[in-house]
Amino acid sequence: MNHRRLSGSFSVFRLLLPAVMLVVLAGCSSSVSRVETWQGNAAQAVNAATLKAPGEIRVTAVNGRSVGNFLMDDLALDYALLPGQNDVVFIYKTIWAKTTVVDNGESKVDIVESKPQLASFDAKAGTVYEFRFDEPTTRREAEREMKDFSAEIVSSAGQVATVSTNYVPSQALARTPIPGIAGVQATSAAAQGNALDTLKAVWANASDEEKKNFLRWAFE
């Protein structure tokens, strides 16, 4: 009798487990979908702006701080930005199914990416921004367009805040846009606090040759 009751309870548990997992995953998804781009409790966080990034856009760093460490890099995410100047580094990625037969272990898709892009703009408190760009319809078109790819950052009112350019590591200085702090002190503190994050962001976007040259220099 007890064995039957236990089996019945186990069956109910098995039936409920998928529903529980869905709830847990939904909670995780909602918590991950908004990413804060600063460290600590910034005074202006309550008035943060929002940058909405679709799955094709992978943001790697904001103001020198790495923000791209996720299990999946094709998530649609919202990035909370402090009001003021923000430097956003990102990559545009497209995925295309191969039309030819693939060998065992070979990827069934081709990935076409843009060069790392830098979008620098003045984020207004409470404003929602999004990426706007031309989407290719074929892989060949994607490969052609990626050479000169750029994206606009557009506010919810339709105003263009900036147009991205090819990212050069020296352009993105580590800084956190918190108004009301003396310029020299703020720049110095941000540079010290975000030095490691800046190195990580630069390393993530560096070519193999650049990484080799850096390591050679570091150990000389």
Image (tube, grey):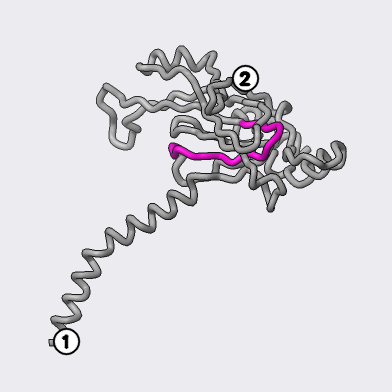
Asked whether, in this view, residue 67 is left or right of residue 180, the answer is: left
Which residue is at a point 70% across and 48% down the rendered structure image? Answer: 42
Q: Is residue 16 magenta?
A: no
Which residue is at a point 16% across and 75% down the rendered structure image? Answer: 8
Asked whether, in this view, residue 66 is left or right of residue 26, the answer is: right
**Relative height, residue 55 to residue 98 (above, below):** below
**Relative height, residue 8 to residue 20 (above, below):** below
Three-letter amino acid code of the residue under disc 1 = Asn
Instruction: Point out residue 105 in the picture as x, y percentages from the top left corner.
Output: 32, 37
Which residue is at a point 64% across and 24% down the rendered structure image? Answer: 167
Residue nearer the viewer, 206 or 38? 38
Instruction: Point out residue 161 in the picture as x, y percentages from the top left corner.
Output: 62, 23
Residue nearer the viewer, 60 or 24? 24
Residue position for label 2:
165
Instruction: Point out residue 34 in the picture as x, y percentages from the top left corner.
Output: 52, 45
Q: Quadrant of residue 171?
A: top right
Q: How many marks?
A: 2
Provide the secondary structure element on which disc 1 rests. helix
Disc 1 from disc 2: Cα separation: 69 Å
Residue position for label 1:
2
Q: Which residues are magenta?
A: 74-88
